[in-house]
Image (tube, rainbow, N blue to C red):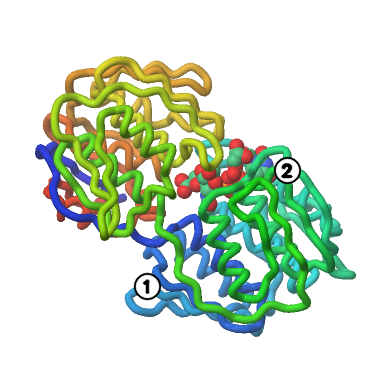
């Protein structure tokens, strides 16, 4: 397995282009199932998770072509011939469960493997099935697979999610576009990826209002057409690279960056003494002098502080002036990076969903282990300002969510190298 070697090399300077969002693309691709006509996505990220979703859609009979060096994904679900999402694909990537709603709506039946356990939490699908059953589906769990059917088609309904789940909102939203009548989803997730999905579905002919607010209203239609849609900027990749100059010093411009995607995160950077400015091409982030200040963070659904930036923010707080308290409210086991940062000399106490980070002067490089996608990149960030060499092992986690990371960081002056595994 490959590893990445990082050497602290002082302040960073230059530009980093931000790609299209993984978490938008992974819900936009299953939307092809809703229509017989072609759906084309532009500004697509080049990631291993996108390849896995391609494999899944092809296993259902969709045609998926990757064009323009992977930045364009052309799809057609004209000839779907399989309604089973196999465990062997689903276990590699939980987002595979986003084919359930579209298949149910288009085909009237679907069999989708439950993804199983995940490093960061139990992540059940009870809210997905709750919403789809409200639309009239009959769902049964058999041999680790959800068997869902709606022989008479789905019917619009009113529902309230117990928690503003991103995935459940996406599955229900896609299914309700072809349901008879009106669907009202209360306490819906408000993430920018949901708004991006709704924009794409509207371009396909869906009637949707309220996306981005807690209440989404959908008027079902008989059929959806095709469309071409540009994937929204990846706010988590953006936030991750905004922290590079914050941790190592210097000034970096993030091309395609937008403050509205990360307002609560930018507020925390400002409180920590990091300057964030809008530019013509995106955002400029700089840490000019002195140590960053410790700030407390609580992760929440959008527009709150994103859980997918908690690990990276912890890396920044490791060398902050003072003590920072980070509360993880979304996932029950998302501090696996803390003991690895501890190997680099960080002073972190974890108790349940709370991590207390006592800032130290400087971290020291060490061999560390990546445990999940965001934990792995927090170790890379920590290595940017550490004394000596940091070796991050099991970097396949990174390939799932960061395209061309070594190239992007090297271009702004970081010493980062990928070392092939033996
Ligand atoms: C999406 O996951 C993202 N993944 C995650 O990003 C992100 O961390 C998460 O939203 C929260 O922002 C994709 O979009 C592919 P949820 P999702 O349903 O949809 C519980 C990354 O690093 N829950 O909002 O799975 C669940 O257990 C990944 O890119 C239920 O209890 O997240 C969790 O505690 C990691 N029952 C909480 O809700 C359900 O039916 C949030 O989950 C569904 C969820």
Q: Secondary structure at mark 1?
A: helix
Q: CA distance from mark 2 to mark 1?
A: 36 Å
Q: Position of residue 148 (x, y in %)?
A: 79, 60
Q: Nearer the viewer, mark 2 or mark 1?
A: 2
Q: Along the line of sight, which residue is nearer the eye, 183 or 411?
A: 183
Camera sees residue 149: no
Name the residue beneath numbered marker 1: 70
Q: Residue at x 22, y 34 (%)?
A: 247
Few, some or many residues within 10 Å of mark 2 (<14, 14–19, 20+): some
Q: Position of residue 296 (x, y in %)?
A: 40, 23
Q: Residue at x 39, y 69 (%)?
A: 43
Position of 78 with respect to 111 (left or right) is left
Q: Position of residue 188 (x, y in %)?
A: 67, 47
Q: Quadrant of ligand 1?
A: top right
Query: Which mark sits nearer the N-terminus, 2 or 1?
Result: 1
Q: Residue at x 41, y 39 (%)?
A: 309
Few, some or many residues within 10 Å of mark 1 (<14, 14–19, 20+): some
């Amino acid at each position: 397995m490959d590893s990445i070697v990082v050497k602290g090399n002082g302040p960073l300077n230059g530009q980093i282009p931000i790609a299209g969002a993984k978490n938008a693309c992974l819900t936009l691709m299953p939307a092809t199932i809703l229509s017989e006509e072609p759906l084309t996505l532009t500004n697509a990220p080049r990631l291993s998770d996108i390849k896995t979703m391609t494999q899944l859609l092809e296993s259902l009979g969709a045609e998926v072509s990757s064009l323009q060096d992977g930045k364009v994904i052309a799809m057609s679900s004209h000839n779907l011939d399989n309604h089973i999402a196999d465990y062997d694909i689903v276990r590699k990537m939980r987002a595979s469960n986003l084919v359930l709603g579209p298949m149910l709506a288009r085909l009237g039946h679907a069999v989708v493997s439950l993804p199983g356990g995940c490093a960061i939490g139990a992540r059940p699908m009870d809210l997905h099935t709750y919403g789809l059953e409200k639309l009239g589906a009959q769902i049964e769990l058999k041999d680790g697979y959800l068997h869902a059917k709606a022989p008479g088609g789905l019917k619009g309904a009113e529902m309230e999610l117990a928690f503003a789940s991103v995935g459940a909102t996406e599955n229900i939203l896609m299914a309700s576009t072809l349901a008879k009548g009106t669907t009202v989803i209360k306490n819906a997730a408000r993430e920018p990826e949901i708004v991006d999905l709704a924009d794409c579905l509207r371009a396909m002919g869906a009637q949707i209002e309220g996306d981005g607010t807690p209440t989404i209203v959908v008027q079902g239609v008989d059929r959806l057409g095709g469309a071409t849609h540009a994937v929204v900027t990846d706010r988590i990749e953006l936030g991750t690279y905004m922290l590079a100059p914050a941790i190592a010093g210097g000034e970096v411009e993030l091309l395609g960056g937008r403050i509205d995607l990360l307002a609560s995160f930018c507020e925390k950077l400002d409180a920590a003494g990091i300057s964030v400015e809008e530019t013509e091409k995106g955002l400029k982030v700089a840490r000019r002098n002195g140590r960053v200040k410790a700030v407390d963070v609580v992760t929440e659904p959008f527009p709150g502080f994103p859980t997918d930036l908690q690990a990276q923010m912890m890396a920044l707080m490791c060398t902050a002036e003072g003590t920072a308290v980070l509360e993880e409210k979304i996932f029950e086991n998302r501090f696996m990076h803390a003991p690895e940062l501890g190997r680099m000399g960080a002073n972190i106490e974890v108790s349940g969903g709370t991590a207390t980070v006592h800032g130290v002067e400087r971290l020291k490089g060490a061999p560390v282990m990546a445990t999940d996608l965001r934990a792995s990149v927090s170790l890379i960030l920590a290595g940017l300002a550490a004394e000596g060499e940091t070796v991050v092992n099991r970097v396949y986690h990174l390939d799932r969510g960061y395209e061309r990371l070594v190239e992007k960081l090297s271009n702004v002056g970081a010493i980062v190298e990928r070392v092939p595994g033996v």
